Image (cartoon, rainbow, N blue to C red):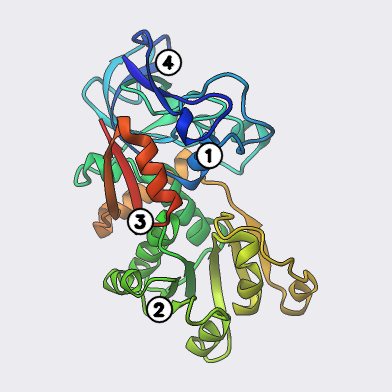
Amino acid sequence: MRALNVAEPWGLDQIKVVELPDPKPGPGEVLIRMRAVSLNYRDLLMVGGIYGRGPATAGPIIPFSDGCGVVEAVGAGVTRVKVGDRVATLFFQGWIAGPPTQEKLSTALGYPIPGAGRELGVFSEQGLSKVPDFLTDEQVACLPCAALTAWRGLFEDARLKPGDTVVLQGTGGVSIFGLQFAHAAGCRTLITSSSDEKLARAEALGADHRVNYRAEPEWAKAVRAATGGVGADLILEVGGGGTIEQSMRAIRIGGHIAIIGVVAGQGNPFNPAALIGNSAKLQGLSVGSREAFEAMCKAIEQHRIGPVVDKLFPWTEAKAAFEAMRGGEHFGKIVLTF
């Protein structure tokens, strides 16, 4: 079989297609023929050698956590899936349910566990889930990280209610899933982007308010205006240091800011004393459990929510796909097909 391989000195130019022996499933394991994988910002960091709980491994890695494939063979004792089932690879192979722990968070695909960027992969049956039939393979590949991150932020950590106000930053995978989920749940949504074209596309998905942060860099004022001065109930904070100050100004008293990403860079440090004044909550968020993934899939099925796949590349052209991500060209998700 062929697989993607990245090693020191890291970087997009180090992405190679290599030949590896065909794997065989052992007890409790499942052999998957991959059909699609999707890109996350985490993958870009990983390929650059700057992601993980410590430095990237000195040896080569097989990247990507988010894949869709079909069961080709099963090992002894497997009961969760059978040959012919279509499944998604779960981001955390060992986080089945309950709160996160160090042990659970140390089972991520891509690193430290070899990822889904290969024609054939062996995975634990516990790290796979069946998926809604109405979705395409490419849409299924978008679910394990971005969709589940948005789902957890909205409904497990913040516990939103219909009528609450949600702010989505940018139009990448997590934010677009957040928009779709929040809209389906009856929440008011406000989304930011530097592109009026992308804002128009977001409006078509249900965005109630749209702000071009190039034209309005102090977008917290727009959030306040849209909420009658109260502020947002939840902000999915994907920008990091470059946006946290505006998020702090936009959140309501007792509101929730889910810290998800760092795509906007370091920015200026914010004054944490503001948290005291408005009793807001900042919570780090790293994907979620298999139990949450399967609850999310039920909601996707019920509401017929279709993940937004913006760009497709052959899996052997991963470098070009990463360049598109790095350039911010996408709306929703970028997917590689096998």
| Amino acid at pointer 2 | Arg
Tell me: residue 160, above or below residue 290.
below
Q: Which of marks 1 and 3 is in front?
A: 3
Tell me: residue 112, above or below residue 101.
above
Disc 1: which residue: 97
Residue 313 image-quadrant placement:
top left
Q: Distance between the residues labelled 2 and 1?
A: 36 Å
Residue 230 image-quadrant placement:
bottom right
Nearest the eye: 215 or 254: 215
Check residue 330 in the rendering and tell me which mark sits there, or answer none.
Answer: 3
Q: Distance between the residues labelled 4 and 2?
A: 48 Å
N-term mark: 4 or 1: 4
| Amino acid at pointer 3 | His
| Relative to 154, 59 lies left or right | right
Check residue 210 in the rendering and tell me which mark sits there, or answer none.
Answer: 2
Tag 4's secondary structure?
loop
Query: Residue placed farthest to the front in the image?
Result: 13
Check residue 28 in the rendering and tell me which mark sits there, or answer none.
Answer: 4
Q: Which of marks 4 and 2 is in front?
A: 2
